[in-house]
Amino acid sequence: MKNIILPTLIPDNQKYVLKYENTPIANIIFKTINVEGDGKIVKKIGLFYERLTKKFADWANGNFKTYAERSYEADTNPRKKYRYRPLSLCYDMSADIIKNTYLSVEINITLFKEGKTVGRRKINHLWDLSKGILRK
């Protein structure tokens, strides 16, 4: 049987505020898991999620920022500068090691507007740690 190197899972939380003319228009919350450790397979998986999170961050600071700005501009309330409720975009990643053989990763991306969920996307991955293969 092949020797399996288990990754170290390190939580990391960050929050960013997007502003339009000094008014907060969106909060972006990243709850990620850094996959670290020795071994080629663990490094491959860690790099995969590092790149995935970076792609999401680039999208959030590009297309999503444009969406948030347009949403703010479309608000007809003359006091919006003082009363505008920012959008909230959450990128929530969790991971578990199953039977010292598999790494299960779940990513939930949720958009909230005025405290209500307006969009949600869920991504599930299952990695075989002995082969470095993404099973699903």
Image: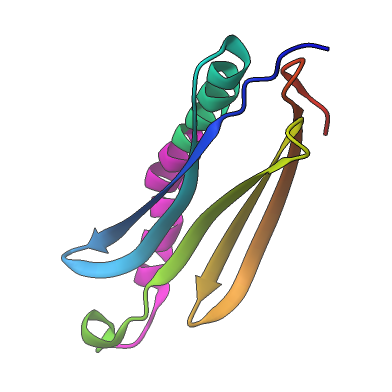
Compared with 118, 102 (above or below) is above
What is the quadrant of the C terminus in the image? top right
Image quadrant assignment for residue 104: top right
Q: Who is closer to the viewer here, 78 or 31?
A: 31
**Magenta segment, principal secondary structure?**
helix
- Indicate whether residue 132 is drawn in magenta: no
Q: Does residue 79 appear left or right of residue 34 in this picture? A: left
The vertical placement of 5 against 119, above or below, is: above
Residue with the most extreme left position: 22
In the displayed structure, does residue 131 sit left or right of residue 75? right
Instruction: Please state which of residues 35 and 59 is positioned toward the viewer in this rendering.
Output: 35
Q: Identify the residue at image location x=36%, y=70%.
A: 72
Give 11 or 118, whichever is nearer the viewer: 11
**Residue 112 at x, y = what percent?**
53, 72
How many numbered dots are placed on residues in this image?
Answer: 0
Q: Quadrant of the N terminus?
A: top right
Query: Left or right of 117: which side holds 13?
Result: left
Relative to residue 7, is residue 104 depicted above or below? below
The region drawn magenta spans 55-77
133 vs 26, left or right, is right
Q: Residue at left 75%, top 33%?
A: 102
Where on the picture, by quarter, is residue 119?
bottom right
Estimate the x, y position of residue 105 in percent, counting from the top left.
67, 43
Question: Where in the figure is residue 120, as x and y percent of width and height?
Answer: 66, 61
Pick whichever, 27 or 10, lies toward us. Answer: 10
Q: Position of residue 130 (x, y in %)?
A: 75, 18
Q: Which colour scheme is used?
A: rainbow
Location of residue 46 with respect to 72 vertically, above or below: above
